[in-house]
Image: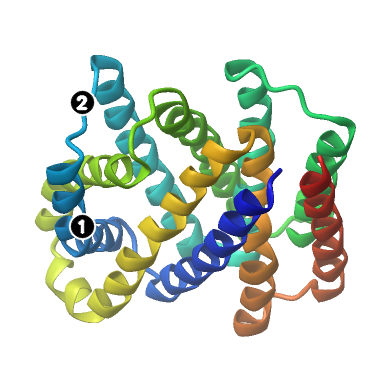
């Protein structure tokens, strides 16, 4: 993996962890997802309009299909993630989601893009996945009888499957069809805004949620596209099977800060997990 791709991934990871912590603080559901998607839509409209005016996109039928499927997959991801944050600890939901996602994404990328990891690449992927397991609490989360932990694992896996699906979908759009990552992200988010609007606006709690979380929604809406656009550009520079696990650098920030801020424990295991992930990232860089 090139230094340029790694730099993009590292920056994206910091931003990704930041918006997840903001989302956790909202303790909301569908209404909040729609609010931050709307914020994304409004905040980035001028930039996208400028890009479209200067470099008009020419999307094929397949391109539009990928945009729509991406919008649906990102919507399912956002709802599953937010639901998980409402019923379980961020340090369970977040690591399980981010662990399932890159594992399935890497396998999918090998099939779709004919990517064959080198020895260092395969070692890096394995170390990162192992680190994710430890950050999530090790095998103790699987043995736990705590209903809150079980809910966290369920929503984490569900979120991770959505991540893997949209990663392959979106990587194909920007890597194979060469659609602008900025335009692609904006269009898929627009799909989410349109689909969720009738649901969010009809909820009785809409007014109170808007008043309570609008500042958080603005913050998340500003950060989400930056994080993902950087990752999409990285996918153009390096194998998707490397970028997908490398993006989980955000866990070194998100899970540990979550454990500190929300007193969710397992600090020693998470530190060991972070060390494994750092070694794994080093192996991917050398691949």
Q: Where is residue 168 in the image (x, y as percent from the top left)?
A: 51, 29
Q: Position of residue 196 (x, y in %)?
A: 20, 47
The answer, for residue 247, to whether it is visible in the render is no
Where, quadrant-wise, is the C terminus in this rendering?
top right
Disc 1 to disc 2, C-alpha distance: 18 Å
The answer, for residue 241, to whether it is visible in the render is yes
Q: Which mark is residue 149?
A: none
Q: Which residue is at a point 23% across and 24% down the rendered structure image?
A: 59
Q: Which of 133 and 187 is in front in this view?
A: 187
**Image height check: is 31 above or below 113?**
below
- The 10 Å Cα crowd at callout 1, few under 14, some 14 to 19, many 20 or more, is few
**Image height check: is 71 above or below 5?**
above
Name the residue that disc number 1 marks. 47
Q: Where is residue 109 in the image (x, y as percent from the top left)?
A: 62, 26
Q: Where is residue 156 in the image (x, y as percent from the top left)?
A: 58, 48
Local secondary structure at mark 1: helix
Q: In which quarter of the image is residue 215?
A: bottom left
Q: Which residue is at a point 63% across and 43% down the rendered structure image?
A: 243
Q: Which residue is at a point 32% across and 67% down the rendered structure image?
A: 222
Mark with earlier residue (1, 2): 1
- The 10 Å Cα crowd at callout 2, few under 14, some 14 to 19, many 20 or more, is few
* 57 lies left or right of 257: left
* 36 lies left or right of 269: left
Q: In which quarter of the image is residue 14?
A: bottom right
Where, quadrant-wise, is the N terminus in this rendering?
top right
Local secondary structure at mark 2: loop
**Image height check: is 13 above or below 181?**
below
Q: Which residue is at a point 27% across and 62% down the rendered structure image?
A: 36
Name the residue that disc number 2 marks. 58
* 170 lies left or right of 202: right
């Amino acid at each position: 993996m090139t230094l340029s791709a790694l730099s993009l991934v590292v920056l994206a990871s910091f931003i990704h962890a930041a918006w997840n912590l903001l989302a956790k603080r909202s303790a909301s559901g569908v209404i909040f997802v729609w609010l931050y998607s709307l914020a994304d839509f409004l905040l980035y409209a001028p930039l996208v309009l400028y890009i479209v005016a200067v470099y008009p996109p020419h999307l094929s039928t397949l391109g539009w299909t990928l945009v729509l499927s991406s919008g649906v997959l990102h919507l399912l991801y956002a709802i599953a993630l937010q639901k998980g944050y409402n019923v379980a600890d961020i340090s369970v939901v977040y690591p399980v989601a981010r662990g399932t996602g890159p594992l399935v994404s890497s396998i999918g990328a090998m099939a779709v893009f004919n990517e064959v990891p080198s020895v260092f690449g395969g070692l890096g992927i394995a170390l990162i996945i192992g680190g994710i397991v430890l950050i999530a609490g090790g095998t103790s989360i699987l043995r736990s009888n705590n209903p809150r932990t079980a809910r966290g694992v369920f929503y984490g896996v569900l979120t991770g499957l959505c991540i893997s699906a949209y990663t392959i979908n979106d990587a194909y759009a920007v890597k194979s069809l060469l659609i602008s990552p900025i335009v692609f992200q904006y269009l898929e988010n627009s799909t989410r805004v349109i689909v969720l609007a009738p649901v969010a606006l009809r909820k009785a709690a809409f007014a109170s949620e808007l008043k309570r979380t609008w500042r958080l929604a603005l913050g998340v809406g500003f950060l989400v596209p930056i994080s993902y656009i950087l990752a999409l550009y990285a996918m153009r520079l390096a194998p998707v099977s490397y970028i997908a696990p490398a993006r989980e650098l955000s866990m070194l920030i998100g899970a540990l800060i979550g454990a500190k801020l929300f007193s969710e424990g397992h600090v020693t295991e998470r530190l060991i997990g972070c060390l494994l992930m750092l070694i794994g990232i080093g192996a991917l860089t050398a691949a």
